[in-house]
Amino acid sequence: QVQLVESGGGSVQAGGSLRLSCVTSGYIAVTYCMAWFRQAPGKEREAVATSFSNRSPRYANSVKGRFTISQDRAKNTLYLQMNSLQPEDTAMYYCYQGSIDFSYWGQGTQVTVSS
């Protein structure tokens, strides 16, 4: 059935960039929300970037101006471009697609930023 698979994580130095990808397999009829979440050890999961069907993307204040969420519908892929990475961005990153009726999560990809 539906699977979301993230890739593109890794280890980078502060100030570097990464682009995360989330490829969706299987069919999802309607997606109201596409988003990227992250969770660091000992911290709560937080929404980093959220794209709604009828409004502009929203970003957490901590990443605003540095991260950009985008989608390539032809490739069934959701992206998160991360620039000017900081050690505080270190976390497991998850992609999400959902609506009121359903939700799908990827398995996560690790991002580690060193100083």
Image (tube, rainbow, N blue to C red):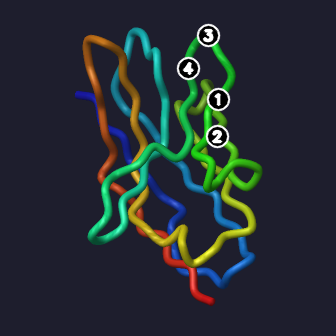
Q: Which of marks 4 and 2 is nearer the N terminus?
A: 4
Q: Mark 3 Cα within 10 Å, few/some/many (few <14, many 20+)?
A: few
Q: Is residue 15 left or right of residue 48?
A: right
Give the residue at x 40% y 36%: 96
Residue 83's image quarter?
bottom right
Q: Mark 4 Cα within 10 Å, few/some/many (few <14, many 20+)?
A: some
Of the 4 image quadrants, the one containing the N terminus is top left
> Of tags 1 and 2, which is closer to the observer?
1
In the displayed structure, would residue 90 be above or below residue 50? below
Q: Which of marks 4 and 1 is nearer the N terminus?
A: 4
Q: Mark 4 points at which residue?
A: 52
Q: Of 64 and 22, which appears nearest the observer?
A: 64
Q: Is mark 2 on a helix, strand or loop?
A: strand
As measured in the structure, the alpha-carbon distance from the residue carrying label 4 to the one carrying label 1 is 6 Å
Q: In the rendering, at what x and y percent does residue 71 appear? A: 63, 32
Q: Mark 1 points at which residue?
A: 57
Give the residue at x 52% y 47%: 48
Q: Give the residue type at disc 1.
A: Pro
Q: Mark 2 points at which residue?
A: 69
Count the marks: how many? 4
Residue 19's image quarter?
bottom right
Of the 4 image quadrants, the one containing the C terminus is bottom right
Q: Name the residue under label 3.
A: 54
Q: In the rendering, at what x and y percent does residue 45 appear? A: 34, 52
Tell me whether circle 1 and circle 2 mark residues in contact (CB < 8 Å): yes
Tell me whether circle 4 and circle 3 mark residues in contact (CB < 8 Å): yes
Q: In the rendering, at what x and y percent does residue 23 appear? A: 47, 41
